[in-house]
Amino acid sequence: MARSAIQNSEYIRSAEQAALLRSMAAKMELAKRINGLLDNFSLSQLEAARRLGMPQSKISAIKNYKLHGISLERLMQALISLDQRIEIIVTPNAEHASSITVAA
């Protein structure tokens, strides 16, 4: 049975929302890692901003997990600036459900 235009629209919206949630979960994991490293290095927000090459306001946003407007790529660049290695692995998903996993 063919889907109606409304069903297709709802399906697309649902898939977009699921992708956004997966992206936010990945960003939260990266921010958690960054925050732990900043704490370990005992860096102030100003020192962290200089080291990571971003405004202090972005450091504050990361510290408070307010990640809207901060990309996954920028968070990965911050981790590299903190001497971390980033590895991206792409594999087939046996369950046919998309996912993003961040391993710490």
Image: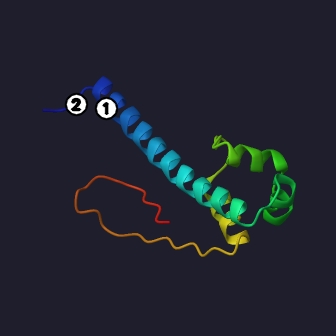
What's the coloring here? Answer: rainbow
Count residues near mark 2 (Cα–Cα under 10 Å), then give few for <14, some for 14-19, many for 20+: few
Q: Position of residue 74 (x, y in %)?
A: 68, 58
Against 13, is 77 above or below?
A: below
- Classify residue 99 by image quadrant: bottom left
46 with respect to 28 (left or right): right
Q: What SS does tag 1 mark?
A: helix
Identity of the residue drawn at 63% across and 43% down: 65
Point out the residue furthest to the left here: 1
Q: Amino acid at mark 2?
A: Arg
Q: Position of residue 11 (x, y in %)?
A: 32, 34
88 with respect to 73 (left or right): left
Mark pair 1, 2: CA separation = 6 Å
Q: Position of residue 36 (x, y in %)?
A: 63, 60
Viewer-nearest residue: 15 or 26 = 26
Name the N-terminal-most of marks 1 and 2: 2
42 with respect to 29 (left or right): right
- Classify residue 95 by image quadrant: bottom left
Count residues near mark 1 (Cα–Cα under 10 Å), then give few for <14, some for 14-19, many for 20+: few
Labels 1 and 2 touching (C-beta < 8 A): yes
Which residue carries the number 1 mark? 8
The circle drawn on residue 3 is: 2
